[in-house]
Image (cartoon, rainbow, N blue to C red):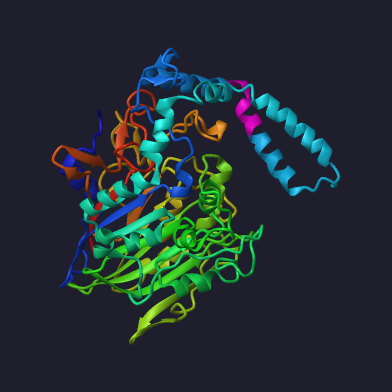
Amino acid sequence: RKKKRGEGMVKILKTLAKHNFLRKRKSKSKAATIRLLQWNILADGLGEDGFLATEFSPIFESADVKSKSYSANEFMKLVREAKLADTASGMASKFSELKGAEKMLKKLKESAEGYSELRESTRKLREETDRSELVKLKKQFQNSPQLQKVDGEILSWSKRSERIKRIVLQARPDVITFQEMDHVQQFLQDKDFSARYTCMVDAAKAYKPPTYTGHKGGSPHDDLSPDKYFHHLLASRAAFAPKSYSNAYLFRSKRDAKAPGTHTIDSIDTIDDDGCVIFWKKDTFKPVELGFLRIPSDTEKSEAVVALTLQHLKTDTMLNVLTAHLPSGDEHSKELERLAVLNNPSANWTARRIHFQGKDWKEVPYEDNPKFVGVTSYVKYFAQRKDTQTIFALDANSRPSFPRIKSDSSSDETNVWHTILSQTTLESIWVQNACIKENGESSDPKNPFVVSVNKMRGPSSNQPPKIGEHQLELIDHVFTNGQLSQLVTSVDLKKKESVPTAPLLYESKEGEAELHLYPSSKMPSDHLPVVVDISL
């Protein structure tokens, strides 16, 4: 299997010299190298959605021993051909129309004008999409024991969480940035994990997931209602920003047959929204500041960037760590949405923080009353702090080579990658390690696909239009003003087993990449972990 990792140390040094990364900096009497692990772990509430894996093959159409079976290559060809057929016939756009019509129908009352017409057009769209090749494929394999086995053996949270914990502990990071974490309490209560790591800036506090009343559309009494969101974040004393009223929470509640507001005390302790969280080694760092930048929203939903300042106990180096999760989607409209999260001067941005003073944590305003106009301005604020180093780790949901487009806040064409690099003054570890060029292209022409995700939904997915959509790209990023960085290329679990880390390199989307999709029995997420040593 090809998993080339750049051209070696010589090439790395040449690239660093070319981009002036080896320039002389003011020498410090104290320096530190820290290991960061950045990982979207795939939320428990979002995990069981038909992710495709071919490791249980041959793949039978049903449990009947006489049913037709397919090798992994044959099965992937079926999926690929069905996807191409639906795209060519325009069926993919019909799915989009149906989704929009169903959303609109839910909002309308039966007595509303146009309701009957919309209901009828929605019915016709359902009939049309039922003739989709992807829907046919879904029906063909709906009773496949091998595909059903994926849910139990690969996507089950009980198995994935143990694997995640094991990989993290063996990687031995100093700082961890997770996205899609919806089990903060589980990790804090785990004996092995909590012996080393915490996300609580106040050790005297115990984390408790927020609660909901169960009212449709939210309630002002909910812990994460818009008016109470910041209060909950700061009062929890956790470096965790959940997405309020998240799909992960909703899906977990439905899956467990416990709708919001009806669950038991035990389930309140375990069901959490997914969000971004920062953990750190308790014997290496001391937290001194915790802040959040809330993403503007016109709905009851809230989410935020997490910003944590840690003091390195041995060197007194001050380290700012920020993490975020940008909106997903491969359409240009979704890239515009992500760009608006990075920079949107017309929106109402709010940031608050707590700082350790004396013996307690107190809320204090940011120095010089800065005006934040997006995530990049917030990151830049920390990057420009004197006598500190900064790391910004995120799931950007955007590849460096995403076509540049014009946004409302920029006169020039741009994308997420270029915007972060140009507006934060930070450098990418992918460029520092010669994995890709500054323009986002692979440094290895023979392997143009430099990736941190390799995933596809299969016939068991409840989202037929996403079946066969192969996402093979680099969307997980770490930016820093650290002097140098060095990637850790794998995590050894035992003598004969190692887990790959990002990035992996592929020649094409077909063949090798299709046969090694994630999640898998070895990789418990649809994202590869990024493990990197950064010299501060």
Q: Residue furthest bottom?
A: 358
Residue for point 56% across, 20% down: 85
State yes or no: residue 89 in magenta.
yes
Residue 517, horizontal then vertical, whole percent: 37, 33
Horizontal relation, residue 225 to residue 496: left or right: right
The one of 266 and 39 positioned closer to us in this rendering:
266
The one of 108 and 159 positioned closer to us in this rendering:
159
Residue 470, horizontal then vertical, whole percent: 45, 31
Q: Is residue 19 visible?
A: no
Q: Residue furthest left?
A: 495
- Looking at the rendered image, the quarter that the C terminus falls into is bottom left
Residue for point 39% across, 79% down: 355
Residue 29, horizontal then vertical, whole percent: 15, 73
Residue 68, horizontal then vertical, whole percent: 44, 13
The one of 479 and 120 positioned closer to us in this rendering:
120
Count the marks: how many? Answer: 0
Horizontal relation, residue 42 to residue 488: left or right: right
The one of 276 and 208 positioned closer to us in this rendering:
208
Q: Is residue 24 visible?
A: yes
**Magenta residues, as a range?**
88-95
Identify the main secondary structure in magenta: helix
Would you identify the image quadrant in which residue 97 lies?
A: top right
State yes or no: residue 383 in magenta.
no
